[in-house]
Each structure stands twice: as structure tokens, then as C-alpha cells.
Image (tube, rainbow, N blue to C red):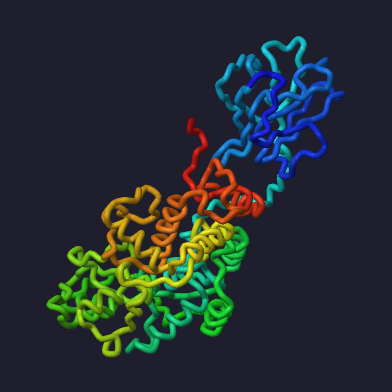
């Protein structure tokens, strides 16, 4: 871009007082007679004075973007002018270089005859040190019983796994009802360790609320919350079972029969005590806890169910085990084949939880004159025929998945999100609703993080597209 040309096709940072909000950095001129240039998130191109005798004309001469990752003290500058610029004493042509707070920038090939700017990240030195940013994967903030974000989270000891208060309270009630030894501690639903105590975790409760503020689509319905709270029984720290006084004497080794008996009692697996479906657990056989109800099932590599999570409903049904005669078995609906599932409404989590894109998709479906299930069935056929690029499918072993693959409810929602993504990108622009047809695509596409906390950005740009940032 030649000096004096200011692009109107993209936002431009300016020294005018009407600059966009969300300022994260600024360019401070060495001569206080000239105004500062404020940099906002979406105003990457800098339009400002480059010479002291330029007659007040502002030109676009560089592009400055915030540094990625966890480093909030760095940024990247790229020269947009037809001439060179100087960054920290280094002559920069068209390449991009890293800068940090305090970097000196000259918008020309030499200092004489050009302004000198100092790059300053706003508020970097004034941040409240008591506010620590915690990077947390939302998947690690979910209850392994209901597979949703924690609600009134409780932590069990000594394994320190976390669950919803209502989910664990109901698990505890069922475990006590099915336990022969009422003094025996309940097992952790996730790792089967004997639980010695459980209590509400106020620190994680604050994190739970922060996640809901950032991802409102994870909020449960009022009916679900009311049901969970009706189950909740953990009001304060509770000690479970009888605590045995540890003896200083070394314990004698147990006999094989005694060890096997204890192993079976700990696992509570129906196939440990009897043969079902032509299979019976061998002594010491490995087991998996069900992610739905917490019950145990044998870890059998010959029964590929297609999901990395273990759900006992489909397994015990295939083995002919009746839940009324044995330990609690989760509903088979939690884990079933893709082709056996039916969907009647677009999930709130579709398109990364962007409600504007969800609304557009719903209108596109309505305009097509077809039911949602009919469209999903069409794209499942395309999926089975390998007509869809699976690189965006957020499931493990994506290449091996077919319509006959067993998946849990959460994985099925991700699968629906994938199919509706391709439904949208395959739709010609002229068939989109008028308010969506004329939108430009976001550089970061479906990976954009700004769409989750900036409603205006989520509405203004199309995010159902591939990232193009950095592409020629």
C-alpha cells in the first residue's frame, strides 16, 4: 500500500477521538504536539501522521496485531507502506516482526523527517496482580456422571474428582441402597476409589460461574437445575464409611480366593459373578466405570462400541443383562448408533454456540421445506460415502466413524454440529436469508474466539467458514 492510501475495505486504527472501543495498545509520539494512536482489537491497520510536516494527513502505513498464546506483552507489526520503516533500530521492509511494550517505531526509512512512536500496551503495568487468569479446558469442568458442566460442584476425597452435587448425591443414595455392607464407603463414580469424604468446592463453583458467563450455551434449563437441586444432599463436609485405624504392622498377603472375592465385590460387575452372553470375567480382569451411571463393565477390546467413553447401557443390553436383577444400569438411550438416533431441533451448541449462526441455520432449514431430521439423514449418507472432509469433526478416530457407530449424547451433538456446518457451507449465497447473504466472512472462521464474547462481531461477520487468516 502506497503512502497516502488508506484502505476502506478493512477497519483502521486512527488518532481521532472517535476510535473504536476495546483499546488494547497505543502508539505514543515522542513529540507531544501530535496525538496518540489507539489500537483496538479489530482495528489492526494503523492510519496516522508519519511526518511532522505532512499537513495533518493520515496514511495507512503498518498493521499491528496482538501477540498470540499466553504472552500478553508482545505484538506483531507488518509494514504496509511502499517504503521501509524502522523498528527498534532495524530497517523493516514488507516482513512482519515482533514488538513489545516500549518498542520504538519510525514510520519511514530514516528518523530525520519522520515522527517517532513508542509502542505501549494499555494497562500492562497496572493489571491487578490479585486477578490470576486460569486457562481451563471446558471439558475438564464437566461432571463425569451427567457429562454436563458442574452445577453446585462437590469434590470427593482422597481422589479429588469433582461432580454435580445432585449427581453425586443420587449416586451415593443408589450405592447405599445396593450395598450389602452399609458401613462400607461408596466408590468414586470416576475412578472407583473408596470415598472417605465429600464437600462443596467453593473455588470451583466460582470457576463454574465464570465459564457460564463466557459460554451461555452451557447453561442448563430451569427444569434440569430444579431436579439436580432436589437430589442435592451435600450441604457441608461429610465423612463416609467407618474410618479404620491404620496398623503399623505389615498386612499379611491375602489368599487368591480372598483377593478374587474382594475384587468382584469392589467392581460390582454382573459378569464377575455369572456368565451372560457367553462371557464371564476372569479373575483380575480389567474393568471400566460407566460414564452414565458409574457402574462397572468389563474392558473388552472385542466389543468396539465406537466411543472413547464407556457407557454400560448398550453393552449390557447386548449381553442380555436385566437392570432389575442387577446393579443400576444406565438407560440405553445414552449410548446408541448414529443411525438409530432422531433429532427434532437444532442444538444450542451448534456453530460453537453462536446463536446468530444457529438462527440463520434454522431459517435455512425452514426455507428448504424439509424437516431437520431429513436434512441430517441426507448428510449422513454423504458422510458414509466419504463426500465430506472430516478434518473438522471433533471426535476421536473420525475416519473410522460411520452411521453404525455407537456414540454418546455429547458426541452425537458434536456430530450434528459437523453435519450442519457442511449444510451451511454447501448452501449457495443466494439461498441464504438476506441479512446473512451480504456478510463478509471472519478471518478466523469457526475458530474465532471473539464471537463468543462480542455479540456485534458474531452478528456482523459470517463464522460458518474455514479460517483464512494467513492464507494468500
Q: Is residue 188 above or below residue 302?
A: below
Task: Tell me: 11 left or right of 300.
Answer: right
Is there any visible trace of residue 2 in the rendered image?
yes
x and y, in percent, of residue 154 in the image: 52, 72
Q: Is residue 395 above or below residue 18?
A: below
- Residue sitting at x 37%, y 70%: 291
Residue in the foreground of this view, choosing between 237 and 9: 9
**Most extreme residue toward the left, as rendered?**
278
x and y, in percent, of residue 104 in the image: 70, 22
Task: Tell me: 341 left or right of 351.
Answer: left
Task: Tell me: 254 left or right of 207.
Answer: left
Q: Quadrant of residue 25?
A: top right
Q: Is residue 467 above or below residue 409?
A: above
Residue in the foreground of this view, choosing between 174 and 433: 433
Q: Quadrant of residue 339?
A: bottom left
Is there any visible trace of residue 246 in the rendered image?
no
Residue in the foreground of this view, choosing between 221 and 419: 419
Task: Tell me: 37 left or right of 243.
Answer: right
- Residue sitting at x 72%, y 28%: 47
Circle count: 0
x and y, in percent, of residue 109 in the image: 67, 12
- Residue sitting at x 32%, y 77%: 332
- Residue sitting at x 40%, y 77%: 245
Q: Quadrant of residue 179?
A: bottom left
x and y, in percent, of residue 314 in the image: 28, 75
Amino acid at each position: 500500500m502506497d503512502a497516502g492510501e488508506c484502505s476502506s475495505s478493512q477497519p483502521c486504527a486512527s488518532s481521532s477521538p472517535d476510535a473504536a472501543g476495546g483499546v488494547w495498545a497505543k502508539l505514543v509520539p515522542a513529540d507531544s504536539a501530535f496525538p496518540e494512536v489507539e489500537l483496538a482489537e479489530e482495528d489492526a491497520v494503523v492510519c496516522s501522521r508519519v511526518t511532522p510536516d505532512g499537513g495533518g494527513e493520515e496514511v495507512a502505513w503498518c498493521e499491528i496485531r496482538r501477540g498470540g498464546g499466553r504472552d500478553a506483552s508482545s505484538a506483531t507489526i507488518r509494514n504496509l507502506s511502499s517504503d521501509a520503516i524502522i523498528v527498534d533500530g532495524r530497517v523493516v521492509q514488507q516482513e512482519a516482526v515482533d514488538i513489545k511494550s516500549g518498542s520504538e517505531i519510525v514510520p519511514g526509512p530514516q528518523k530525520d523527517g519522520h515522527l517517532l512512536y513508542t509502542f505501549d500496551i494499555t494497562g500492562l503495568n497496572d493489571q491487578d496482580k490479585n486477578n490470576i487468569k486460569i486457562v481451563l479446558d471446558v471439558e475438564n469442568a464437566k461432571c463425569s456422571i451427567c457429562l454436563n458442566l458442574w452445577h453446585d460442584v462437590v469434590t470427593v476425597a482422597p481422589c479429588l474428582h469433582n461432580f454435580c452435587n445432585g449427581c453425586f448425591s443420587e449416586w451415593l443414595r443408589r450405592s447405599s441402597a445396593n450395598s450389602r455392607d452399609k458401613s462400607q464407603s461408596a466408590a468414586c463414580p470416576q475412578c472407583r476409589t473408596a470415598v472417605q469424604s465429600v464437600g462443596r468446592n467453593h473455588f470451583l463453583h466460582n470457576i463454574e460461574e465464570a465459564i457460564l458467563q463466557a459460554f451461555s450455551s452451557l447453561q442448563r434449563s430451569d427444569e434440569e437445575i430444579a431436579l439436580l437441586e432436589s437430589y442435592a444432599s451435600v450441604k457441608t463436609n461429610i465423612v463416609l464409611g467407618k474410618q479404620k485405624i491404620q496398623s503399623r504392622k505389615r498386612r499379611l498377603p491375602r489368599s487368591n480366593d480372598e483377593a478374587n472375592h474382594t475384587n468382584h465385590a469392589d467392581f460390582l460387575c454382573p459378569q464377575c459373578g455369572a456368565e451372560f452372553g457367553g462371557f464371564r470375567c476372569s479373575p483380575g480382569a480389567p474393568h471400566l466405570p460407566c460414564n452414565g451411571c458409574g457402574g462397572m463393565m468389563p474392558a473388552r477390546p472385542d466389543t468396539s462400541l465406537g466411543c472413547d467413553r464407556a457407557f454400560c447401557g448398550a453393552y449390557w443390553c447386548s449381553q442380555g443383562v436385566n437392570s432389575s436383577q442387577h446393579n443400576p444400569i444406565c438407560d440405553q438411550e445414552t449410548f446408541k448408533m448414529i443411525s438409530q438416533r432422531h433429532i427434532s431441533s437444532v442444538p444450542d451448541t451448534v456453530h460453537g454456540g453462536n446463536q446468530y449462526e444457529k438462527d440463520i441455520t434454522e431459517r435455512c432449514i425452514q426455507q428448504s421445506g424439509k424437516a431437520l431430521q431429513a436434512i441430517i439423514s441426507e448428510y449422513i449418507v454423504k458422510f458414509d460415502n466419504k463426500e465430506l472432509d472430516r478434518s473438522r469433526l471433533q471426535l476421536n478416530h473420525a475416519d473410522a466413524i460411520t452411521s453404525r457407530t455407537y456414540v454418546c449424547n455429547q458426541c452425537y451433538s458434536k456430530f450434528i454440529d459437523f453435519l450442519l456446518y457442511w449444510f451451511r457451507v454447501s448452501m449457495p449465497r443466494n439461498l441464504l436469508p438476506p441479512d446473512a447473504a451480504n456478510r463478509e466472512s471472519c478471518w478466523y472462521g469457526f475458530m474465532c474466539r471473539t464471537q463468543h464474547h462480542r455479540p456485534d462481531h458474531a452478528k456482523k461477520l459470517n463464522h460458518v467458514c474455514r479460517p483464512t487468516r494467513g492464507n494468500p
